[in-house]
Amino acid sequence: MSDFKLTEWIFTTDHKRVGILYLIGSLAAFGVAGCAAVYIRLNQLSPSGGLFSDPQNYNIALYFHGAAMILAFLIPGLTGFFANYLVPLMIGARDVAFPRINAFSVWLFFAAIVLALISLMVSDGPDVMWTGYPPYSVTTVGNTAFYVFTVHLLGFSSILGAVNFLVTILYMRAKGMGFNQMNIFVWTVLGAFVLQLIFIPVLASAVTMLLFDKYLGTHFFDPTGGGDVLLYQNLFWFYSHPAVYVILLPAMGVLFEVISTMAKNRVFNYKACVYGGVFGLILLSGEVWVHHLYVAGMPNWLRTGQMVTTLLISVPVGLMVISLWGTLYRAAITYNVAMHYACACLFLLLVGGLTGIPLAMTVLDLHLGETAFIHAHFHFVMALFATFSIFSGIYFWFPKMTGRVADSKPALIGFWLNFVGVTMTFTPLFIIGMQGMPRRYATYEQFPQFEPYHQMATLGAMVVVVGMLLTFYSWINGAIRGPKAAENHWRSKSLEWTHAPSPPGPGNFPGQDPEVAKEWTPYDYAR
Amino acid sequence: MPSLRRLMAVAVPMAMAAAPAMANGGTPHSQWDHLWGHVLLDLVVIGVVFGLGALWMMFRYRAKSPDDVGTGPKLTKAQAIGWALLPAAIFMADDFFLAAKGWSLFTVYRSAPADAMEIKVTGYQWYWEFDYGNGVVTQELKVPVGKPVVLRMTSPDVIHSFGLAEYRVKEDLMPGRVSWLWFVADKPGKTVATCTMYCGLAHSKMYSDVVAVPASEFHAWMESKVRQARATTDSSRG
Amino acid sequence: MRSLVLASLLVVLATAEAWAEYGRVPFSEVDTGLFRVEEAKFLGVKPDPATPLRDETGAPTTLGAYGGGKPVILVLSYYNCDGTCSVVNADLAAQLAQVEQWRLGADYSVLTVSFNAEEGPETLAKFRKTLDLPKGAPEGWRFALAGNSTDARRLADSVGFKYFWSAQDRAFLHPGLYVFLSPQGRVVRFLYSTNTEPRDVELALTDALGDQIRPAQILNFALSLCYSYSFKDGRYKLNLPMFFGFASLGVGVILFIISVAVYRRRIHRPNGRPKGEDLPCQACAD
């Protein structure tokens, strides 16, 4: 730590440092958005609004929680931190294809985070939810511009990242490394960035038109002037449903790496996972957005058609799940904190994925849509699953990044508190959702019978707070005082462990460029 | 079973009086509950199989020594294809089964009986208004038991969503479009219609009572309301 | 000259106001806004299918007897009308002749109804003769007479159509309004004869078909997405966000192709990897 120079970090073009900057930024966003979540839960303690009962602040907290968690934590955490840190190491490259562009995109990301934080401090902060549906987002006194500009900055940052990583993965792999020898994580990153690159411009144009409608008086989404209110929702979800897979894919990828290493086993049916799972998701992701508009008065035939495509998503996801489960078959599992989180992910994925099936069915969604059931569903499958996967990855690659181990008693206790806490928080929401508790309610005086469930959820959130504090403590403590890690601490077969020191220096690989043999795979433990 | 009990509880003559759409399988919302039961069973079976499978493997395949390695099977080409196609076929079969089930109930939801009563709903920031079409406008929705009710809905300001959990229906209202839904009350009682699309400051306070009363009581109420409405228009004309 | 026009305009306005004050009937030229339908109130409404009408021979029938599971363009007129009515109908006929997506008779029908209950089959026949109807008209374009004046008033009220007898003009004053009914007989769209083009009629018919679009007609539906109805203008306008959305999707696809294909060409240049030459130095700088 003695040779630490701040300017070196700010002006770095090293993919590992850029990655760690992404990690710091996204964890900061996670912290603030987590505080917003606690505020939301405290608001639900009683039907009349719990500890705080200012609906305006509640709505701003909801907006910030959603937007920051998805756009500033999950997406940059997975496609910013993990992709940056790991992809060049895993494919045996010395850096990404365009290091300076990479540095620029992390600065854009930080600018977006600063902008998002400022939006919490201005009066009339944005209260448009992370979806920003017009006409509300146009007529509200809330400051929609902050939302739009945050999306612009993050979108631009992601597009730059996407170009960078597509080129890196396609053209900078180590000598001898074929596509079928890449880590699953690299495949999932490739898939996520293809989706980002193709679909982000649509979101950017949608929110830009929103901005024009609100501040320049255009009528893009105003029916009196020839606009169509539903079109925004179509454009928004045309990007934002694929965005779910931008999160799901790398989160799955991290799990594959952690589980195959800790289980010392090859990935079950690698090709089905990649060519059926990853490719299937990319192909289907653009044809299912209408399931977010099942109750929005879309034509019946469109709702029915997209019900079928949405249900078919279970095929690629199912193939990935079978590969994931199959990797445990005849394995030799050692448990550490990373593996605990990974195992928890399997159950979160199961609950979240399966509760998605009724929501894919149009007619069931006519009751379940926009209720706490949906809220619980996407928290399980997106928020909790991806967050636990990120935490699993952080514990797993902690020795690689710092040369020290973060596994400790507080880390393990933190894991159990987190797992029990999130289950306590979101299971009651399934139950009251089935009975019709709507989402995004500041108060619920018309449903006094749901009070105990909300209190249970709030209690769960408090447990998570303690768990998160222990988790953050374990990282900080581990980085400073943790036990020294071995070079290949988990005895992995993947390139980032076998060919690079921990932590890797500039240029990643000492000496010669790495080369891999024809029969090499990152998962051949059996030999 | 709960759906059966609900059916029994329905006064039979009332159900008979209602539309042909209800003739097989009861009211749309009881059919919904029935379908939900099926789907839930489907999910629980898949969930238990995969969940127990994972738990068992996590326990069974712990490493015996630090140098232990997994002996997961290396699939031949045929096995690999089989392990892709077979699960895909099973998942797709389940998907299409569910899609067919969902579609048949969806068509019931989206074809209102011809003899349905029509009520116009307008969602304002932040209250509901129900217009019965004969000069009667209320803030509380009153419907006769056993008579299908179609709601034609629109909004002059922002998007709202009319959610009636008791009858398992929900549809958005928005400026420039008219959306609709239908339901039928099978027994007298009071429930609540809520706004389920975020619409601003008092979003969570945007709710109205929905009261189902026997047909005779409904007609008496309607007559008095019509008289009242006429009296007001007459007096305002002076 | 300009001041003269201005002065005469002022006089007209002043007299119109004065008339309005005394409860007299205003000029139709001055108050066209009066006839605009409150669309939010009448869209989705279903005029009573049992409304009594008389057919071309004078025999009693009902509104519901027309349509036959297809969209209907309802035109309220009266056959003694010496001015606008025949123009409104003739305009529609001219526009329908240019509608190519939907065929009159096969895909939709037109129903002209007289709201003047005093008219009989003879005036109808005379009126019809003056019109130059498009092909397919005999079965696709039907004419009907009001059952009686209360029913006519009720039908007009139920679709927001306003008309009244002007003693001064010795004529009915009314708007040139086309009411598009869905196959179920619900009001889906209003168009005004003054600013309607064939494309508007085409789009309104697509809207009226709604969920009954057959797979073969999906292209028509897709084309209709390029336009959306403007309530302010009473007609369809280009749906710009749709174009921007597609354009930005195109940008995304192009970016994808650039990053996948363009660098493929660079990599095959003699010097090897793209930007690869400055990589080690980049790394050393840290």
Image (tube, coloured by chain):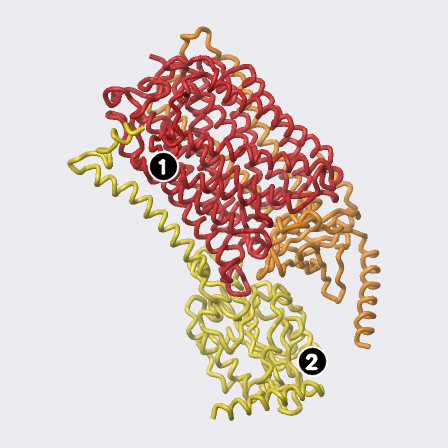
In the displayed structure, A386 sits above or below B63; it is below
Q: Residues within 10 Å of mark 2 (few under 14, many from 20)?
A: some
Foreground pick, A334 / B79: A334
Q: Position of residue A40 (x, y in %)?
A: 64, 38
- The amino acid sitting under disc 2 is Asn
- The residue depicted at 71 percent of the width and 41 percent of the height is A49
Does C70 sit left or right of B236 as displayed?
A: left
* Cα distance between the residues tagged 1 and 2: 80 Å
Q: Disc 1 marks which amino acid?
A: Ala
Q: Position of residue C25 (x, y in %)?
A: 66, 87
What's the chain of the residue with tag 1?
A
- Residue A34 visible in the snapshot: yes
Query: Can residue A522 be seen in the rendering of this structure?
Result: no
Q: Nearer the viewer, residue A159 or A281?
A: A159
Q: Under tag 2, what secondary structure?
A: loop
Mark sitting on residue C148: 2
Chain A representation colour: red
Q: Residue A103 carries which label?
A: 1
Chain shaded orange: B
Residue A477 vertical placement versus A76 (above, below): above
Q: What tint does the image give chain C? A: yellow
Residue at 46% from the left image edge and 33% from the top image edge: A77
Same subunit, labels 1 and 2: the answer reads no
The quadrant the C terminus of chain C occupies is top left
Q: Relative to residue C13, is residue A500 drawn left or right?
A: left
Residue at coordinates 60% horizontally, 38% vertically from top-left? A375
Few, some or many C-alpha atoms within 10 Å of disc 1 (few <14, some 14-19, many ≥20)? Answer: many
Residue at the outermost left position: C270
SS category of the residue bearing label 1: helix
